[in-house]
Image (cartoon, rainbow, N blue to C red):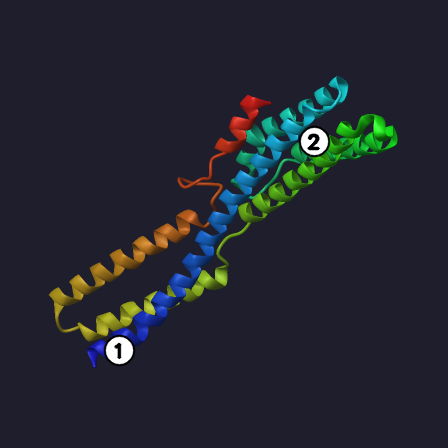
Amino acid sequence: MTSTMLSGILLPTGLVIAFVAADVWQQETKGRTAVEQEAIAVADVLRTAKHLPAELREQVTGLTSDYIREIVEEEWRLMARGDSSSKAENLLDVLEQTSVHIDIQARNAGAARVGMEQAARDLRRYVQQVESARNQRLLVANSRVSTNKWFAVLVLLFVAACVIYELHATQRRPLALALALFSLSFGATLYLIASYDRPFTGATIIAPESMTLMQMRA
């Protein structure tokens, strides 16, 4: 009977916590992937800019360098409270407009600037990839476990603790041991969920290491 009651409450409790944890760690993985993709796209922008005429190359490189600096020095700090940098947004808009302008220039140049035309197309595509990766990063920075999920988990844990108490109410030592083990195991799990719930803040923060490398390269 004791085993049946414990299984009946601990099994759904564990399943709910597992589902919540899976969502959290999936978001953390998405955040890291977005950061890596953004850094790769920035590297592609810088590489492609080398194939542009000097004036355009300096313009693209300068905008990209300013964007990286703003991301590393300001936006990462703002993401910790679910915000973003308007300056980074503006720099990215200008960079995208510049890539469109270069693409139009290259098309108008015709066969005489075949290499530039290819570079312009690549540049425009890579800038769009930077924007897409940044949007994904910001979405992850603003995602967190909903209040309803936390409420459901806490209710189930409370019910499980009550069941354990009722089953060992007359046995003080087994009761203390059961509650201690229960609190330790589920407490550790909830701590991990809470730590990774917001991957761009706290002790488990996703650091801008990839973007910092691009900053050194720009």
- Seen from this angle, which residue lies furthest top? 54
Q: Can I make out residue 94 in this image?
A: no
Q: Amino acid at mark 1?
A: Met
Residue at 71% x, 25% y is: 60
Q: Amino acid at mark 2?
A: Leu
Viewer-proximal residue, 37 or 186? 37
Judge whether 134 appears above or below 212 on screen: below
Picture mark count: 2
Q: Residue 4's quadrant in the figure?
A: bottom left
Judge whether 16 appears above or below 50 on screen: below
Question: Dot 2: within a 10 Å radius of its alpha carbon, few (fewer than 14), some, or many (20 or more) residues?
Answer: some
Instruction: Give the quarter of the figure containing the N terminus.
Output: bottom left
Q: Residue 196 location, x and y as percent?
A: 42, 48
Q: Residue 62 location, x and y as percent?
A: 68, 22
Residue 115 is tagged as: none
Residue at 58% x, 38% y is: 38
Residue at 41% x, 41% y is: 204
Q: Residue 79 location, x and y as percent?
A: 55, 40
Q: Secondary structure at mark 2?
A: helix
Q: Residue 149 location, x and y as percent?
A: 46, 63
Judge whether 214 appears above or below 14 on screen: above
Q: Which residue is mark 2?
A: 91
Viewer-proximal residue, 59 or 50? 50
| Nearest to N terminus: mark 2 or mark 1 | 1
Residue at 39% x, 62% y is: 18
Q: Which residue is mark 1?
A: 5
Left or right of 189? Residue 1 is left
